[in-house]
Amino acid sequence: MSHPEWVLAFHQKNQEIKKIQNKYYLYEVSSYYHKDKKKTVKKSGKYLGRITKDGVVNKENKESFALPCVVSVKEFGASDLILSFLTKEQTLLERFFPQQAQQLLCCIVFRLLYQSSFKQMPWHLESSYLSERYAAVNMGSRAMTEMLQVVGKQREVIASVMRELCGGGRNFIDRQHTYYHTIRSKFVGTSRL
Protein backbone atom coordinates (compact mmCIF):
# COMPACT_ATOMS: atom_id res chain seq x y z
CA MET A 1 0.00 0.00 0.00
CA SER A 2 1.42 3.40 -0.92
CA HIS A 3 1.17 6.30 1.49
CA PRO A 4 1.45 10.04 0.81
CA GLU A 5 4.91 11.60 0.85
CA TRP A 6 4.21 13.59 4.04
CA VAL A 7 3.40 10.31 5.84
CA LEU A 8 6.46 8.50 4.51
CA ALA A 9 8.67 11.34 5.73
CA PHE A 10 8.14 10.12 9.33
CA HIS A 11 8.91 6.45 8.58
CA GLN A 12 12.12 5.02 10.05
CA LYS A 13 13.79 1.63 10.22
CA ASN A 14 11.92 -0.95 12.36
CA GLN A 15 8.69 1.06 12.17
CA GLU A 16 5.43 0.40 10.37
CA ILE A 17 2.74 2.80 9.09
CA LYS A 18 -0.86 1.67 9.35
CA LYS A 19 -3.81 3.45 7.77
CA ILE A 20 -6.98 3.14 9.86
CA GLN A 21 -10.09 5.09 8.84
CA ASN A 22 -8.11 7.57 6.73
CA LYS A 23 -5.68 8.32 9.56
CA TYR A 24 -2.08 7.20 9.70
CA TYR A 25 -0.49 5.56 12.74
CA LEU A 26 3.11 4.60 13.50
CA TYR A 27 4.04 1.32 15.23
CA GLU A 28 7.26 -0.45 16.10
CA VAL A 29 7.73 -3.56 14.03
CA SER A 30 9.92 -6.60 14.32
CA SER A 31 10.17 -9.95 12.61
CA TYR A 32 11.03 -13.47 13.67
CA TYR A 33 11.45 -16.81 11.96
CA HIS A 34 8.47 -19.18 12.38
CA LYS A 35 9.85 -22.76 12.42
CA ASP A 36 6.56 -24.46 11.48
CA LYS A 37 5.74 -22.13 8.59
CA LYS A 38 9.42 -21.94 7.64
CA LYS A 39 9.27 -18.23 6.89
CA THR A 40 9.78 -14.84 8.51
CA VAL A 41 6.72 -13.38 10.25
CA LYS A 42 6.19 -9.68 10.91
CA LYS A 43 5.15 -8.72 14.46
CA SER A 44 3.70 -5.28 15.22
CA GLY A 45 4.96 -3.81 18.45
CA LYS A 46 4.44 -0.71 20.53
CA TYR A 47 2.19 2.12 19.32
CA LEU A 48 4.36 5.18 18.65
CA GLY A 49 1.72 7.78 17.71
CA ARG A 50 -0.52 9.21 15.05
CA ILE A 51 1.09 10.77 12.00
CA THR A 52 -0.09 14.27 11.09
CA LYS A 53 1.39 16.77 8.65
CA ASP A 54 3.01 18.52 11.62
CA GLY A 55 4.63 15.40 13.07
CA VAL A 56 4.00 12.26 15.11
CA VAL A 57 1.54 12.91 17.95
CA ASN A 58 1.92 10.69 21.00
CA LYS A 59 1.34 10.85 24.77
CA GLU A 60 4.60 12.68 25.46
CA ASN A 61 4.12 15.54 23.00
CA LYS A 62 0.33 15.68 22.68
CA GLU A 63 0.05 19.11 24.34
CA SER A 64 2.32 20.75 21.77
CA PHE A 65 0.04 19.50 18.96
CA ALA A 66 -3.23 20.35 20.70
CA LEU A 67 -5.63 22.23 18.48
CA PRO A 68 -7.60 25.12 19.93
CA CYS A 69 -10.65 23.56 21.54
CA VAL A 70 -12.62 26.76 22.00
CA VAL A 71 -15.76 26.35 19.93
CA SER A 72 -18.58 28.82 20.16
CA VAL A 73 -22.03 28.15 18.74
CA LYS A 74 -24.23 31.21 18.66
CA GLU A 75 -27.53 32.26 17.15
CA PHE A 76 -26.99 34.44 14.08
CA GLY A 77 -29.75 34.37 11.47
CA ALA A 78 -32.75 35.85 13.24
CA SER A 79 -30.75 38.57 15.01
CA ASP A 80 -29.00 39.60 11.82
CA LEU A 81 -32.31 39.65 9.91
CA ILE A 82 -33.96 41.87 12.54
CA LEU A 83 -30.97 44.25 12.58
CA SER A 84 -31.09 44.48 8.79
CA PHE A 85 -34.69 45.72 9.09
CA LEU A 86 -33.77 48.21 11.84
CA THR A 87 -31.24 50.35 9.97
CA LYS A 88 -33.26 53.57 10.38
CA GLU A 89 -33.88 52.86 14.07
CA GLN A 90 -30.21 52.03 14.57
CA THR A 91 -29.15 55.33 13.02
CA LEU A 92 -31.57 57.29 15.21
CA LEU A 93 -30.50 55.50 18.38
CA GLU A 94 -26.84 56.13 17.62
CA ARG A 95 -27.58 59.81 17.03
CA PHE A 96 -29.81 60.44 20.06
CA PHE A 97 -28.45 57.83 22.53
CA PRO A 98 -24.81 57.25 21.48
CA GLN A 99 -23.79 55.62 24.78
CA GLN A 100 -26.82 53.31 25.02
CA ALA A 101 -27.53 52.58 21.33
CA GLN A 102 -26.01 49.09 21.23
CA GLN A 103 -27.64 48.10 24.50
CA LEU A 104 -31.02 49.35 23.27
CA LEU A 105 -30.64 47.47 19.97
CA CYS A 106 -29.90 44.25 21.84
CA CYS A 107 -32.99 44.83 23.99
CA ILE A 108 -35.11 45.36 20.86
CA VAL A 109 -33.83 42.19 19.20
CA PHE A 110 -34.30 40.01 22.29
CA ARG A 111 -37.78 41.38 22.99
CA LEU A 112 -38.81 40.68 19.38
CA LEU A 113 -37.23 37.22 19.21
CA TYR A 114 -37.88 35.82 22.68
CA GLN A 115 -40.27 38.25 24.43
CA SER A 116 -37.40 38.31 26.89
CA SER A 117 -37.48 39.97 30.28
CA PHE A 118 -34.51 42.15 31.24
CA LYS A 119 -33.40 39.46 33.66
CA GLN A 120 -32.95 36.93 30.81
CA MET A 121 -31.19 39.30 28.40
CA PRO A 122 -27.62 38.53 29.58
CA TRP A 123 -28.19 34.87 28.71
CA HIS A 124 -29.65 35.75 25.30
CA LEU A 125 -26.71 38.05 24.62
CA GLU A 126 -24.23 35.32 25.55
CA SER A 127 -25.88 32.85 23.17
CA SER A 128 -26.19 35.35 20.30
CA TYR A 129 -23.62 36.58 17.81
CA LEU A 130 -24.54 40.09 19.01
CA SER A 131 -22.13 39.46 21.89
CA GLU A 132 -19.34 39.51 19.30
CA ARG A 133 -20.77 42.29 17.16
CA TYR A 134 -21.29 44.49 20.22
CA ALA A 135 -18.50 43.18 22.43
CA ALA A 136 -18.59 46.14 24.84
CA VAL A 137 -22.30 45.76 25.66
CA ASN A 138 -23.10 44.86 29.25
CA MET A 139 -26.60 43.47 29.83
CA GLY A 140 -26.14 42.78 33.54
CA SER A 141 -28.75 43.99 36.01
CA ARG A 142 -26.81 47.09 37.14
CA ALA A 143 -25.94 48.11 33.60
CA MET A 144 -29.55 47.65 32.48
CA THR A 145 -30.83 49.69 35.46
CA GLU A 146 -28.41 52.52 34.67
CA MET A 147 -29.33 52.45 30.99
CA LEU A 148 -33.07 52.57 31.75
CA GLN A 149 -32.57 55.45 34.18
CA VAL A 150 -30.49 57.47 31.72
CA VAL A 151 -32.82 56.87 28.79
CA GLY A 152 -35.99 57.24 30.84
CA LYS A 153 -34.99 60.70 32.08
CA GLN A 154 -34.69 61.99 28.52
CA ARG A 155 -38.39 62.20 27.71
CA GLU A 156 -37.99 64.92 25.04
CA VAL A 157 -35.28 62.94 23.25
CA ILE A 158 -37.48 59.82 23.29
CA ALA A 159 -40.34 61.88 21.83
CA SER A 160 -38.01 63.20 19.10
CA VAL A 161 -36.94 59.67 18.18
CA MET A 162 -40.54 58.50 18.03
CA ARG A 163 -41.54 61.52 15.91
CA GLU A 164 -38.80 60.77 13.39
CA LEU A 165 -39.70 57.07 13.31
CA CYS A 166 -43.35 57.90 12.69
CA GLY A 167 -42.59 60.49 10.01
CA GLY A 168 -43.72 63.44 12.12
CA GLY A 169 -47.19 62.03 12.73
CA ARG A 170 -48.69 61.14 16.05
CA ASN A 171 -48.61 57.37 16.12
CA PHE A 172 -48.25 55.48 19.36
CA ILE A 173 -47.62 51.87 20.26
CA ASP A 174 -48.62 50.66 23.70
CA ARG A 175 -47.33 47.59 25.49
CA GLN A 176 -50.42 45.61 24.50
CA HIS A 177 -49.27 45.46 20.86
CA THR A 178 -52.19 47.72 19.83
CA TYR A 179 -51.65 50.48 17.29
CA TYR A 180 -53.10 53.94 17.98
CA HIS A 181 -53.47 57.01 15.83
CA THR A 182 -54.02 60.42 17.39
CA ILE A 183 -56.15 63.23 16.06
CA ARG A 184 -55.74 66.53 17.93
CA SER A 185 -54.28 64.75 20.99
CA LYS A 186 -57.38 62.54 21.41
CA PHE A 187 -56.74 58.78 21.33
CA VAL A 188 -58.74 56.79 18.82
CA GLY A 189 -58.63 53.02 19.08
CA THR A 190 -59.19 50.18 21.46
CA SER A 191 -56.95 48.22 23.74
CA ARG A 192 -57.02 44.51 24.43
CA LEU A 193 -57.03 44.56 28.21
Image: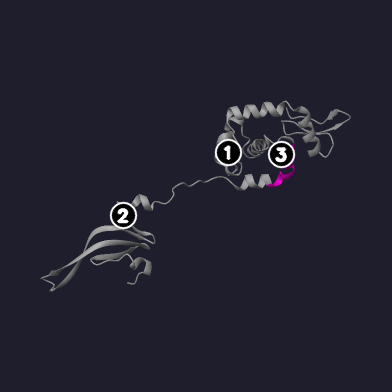
Residue 145: % across, % down: 63, 27
Q: Percent from the top left, x then y, of residue 122?
A: 57, 34
Q: Is residue 93 above or below residue 37?
A: above
Identity, as a three-letter code, of the amino acid under mark 2: Asn
Farthest residue toward the right?
Answer: 184
Q: Depth check: give the residue in front, 134 or 180.
A: 134
Q: Which mark is residue 65?
A: none
Asked whether residue 4 appears in the rendered view, the answer is no
- Number of on-image labels: 3
The answer to whether one can see residue 23 in this image is yes
Residue receiving disc 2: 58
The residue at which mark 1 appears reads as 125
- In space, the residues marked 3 and 1 are separated at their CA atoms by 19 Å
Between discs 1 and 2, the one toward the N terminus? 2
Mark 1 lies on a secondary structure that is helix
- Closer to the chain start, of discs 3 and 1, is 3
Pick whichever of labels 3 and 2 is earlier in the sequence.
2
Mark number, residue 94: 3
| Amino acid found under the numbered disc labelled 3 | Glu
**Magenta-drawn segment:** 84-95
What is the CA distance from the residue labelled 3 to the residue labelled 2? 54 Å
Quadrant (top left, top right, bottom left, bottom right) of the C terminus? top right
Helix or strand or loop: what does disc 3 sit on?
helix
Q: Position of residue 188 (x, y in %)?
A: 84, 30
